[in-house]
Amino acid sequence: EVQLVESGGVVVQPGGSLRLSCAASGFTFDDYAMHWVRQAPGKGLEWVSLISWDGGSTYYADSVKGRFTISRDNSKNSLYLQMNSLRAEDTALYYCAKDEAPYSSSWFFDYWGQGTLVTVSS
Amino acid sequence: QSALTQPASVSGSPGQSITISCTGTSSDVGSYNLVSWYQQHPGKAPKLMIYEVSKRPSGVSNRFSGSKSGNTASLTISGLQAEDEADYYCCSYAGSSTYVVFGGGTKLTVL
């Protein structure tokens, strides 16, 4: 059974930094690209970032480019999101999501975690 | 404002069929057969219902179907059931600059 468990969400002040983690199990982690998708309270879904199966390629939404960094440790079956220069508008539930295609990017998400809440507030 | 446009809400009675539209542009929905649909119940994570416009993942009821015409994709749910009441989001690949765009979501109410 595929499981994705996010952690690291807390309340942080504007301008602060935070690192989210996602622990994966139930599939061959290093075969698949992984995404972060966020959802502001009461709002819709917003794609944040993608990292390729081998970590060699990364992609970002314009809203986070230059502030967020996605990474992965395939030896630990873990995905990360380093978030810097946080703003109030980054407040959201952050989901990690598995890409469907092995060794590629299908640009859709077949499994999702339950999310971790990041609140940016003074 | 979301990149893809969905109706804020739709409703239907049990047993009926409903269709949710998702309108994009020639830069996203119109250019790629990479439209997906997600169901989200309150307090839960999204669930993949349709991918690549019209394909259903294993385990998803065949009451759910997807299609596309031009810049507009559609999700149809036939034989509505109470458990279908949820928010539905469309999503599309949008090329090598924007990458992924979502619709604003549609709240389905089963009357």
Image (spheres, rainbow, N blue to C red):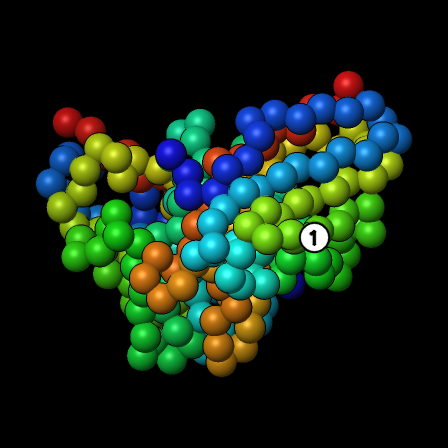
Asked if B62 appears above or below A35 in the picture, the reply is above
User: Is residue A111 among the parts visible in the rendering?
Assistant: no
Q: Position of residue B10 (x, y in %)?
A: 67, 26
The chain that hosts pointer 1 is B
Residue toward you, B27 or A38 = B27
Quadrant in which the N terminus of chain A is drawn: bottom right
Q: Which residue is mark 1?
A: B67
Looking at the picture, which amino acid does disc 1 mark? Ser
- Secondary structure at badge 1 equals strand
Q: Position of residue B14 (x, y in %)?
A: 85, 27
Task: Tell me where residue B82 sits by quadrant.
Answer: top right
User: Is residue B11 among the parts visible in the rendering?
Assistant: yes
Tell me: A21 left or right of A115: left
Q: Residue at x 69, y 44 (%)?
A: B75
Q: Residue at x 61, y 25 (%)?
A: B9
Q: Residue at x 31, y 79 (%)?
A: A56
Tell me: A27 left or right of B57: left
Residue toward you, A35 or B76 = B76
Asked if B49 appears above or below A102 in the picture, the reply is above
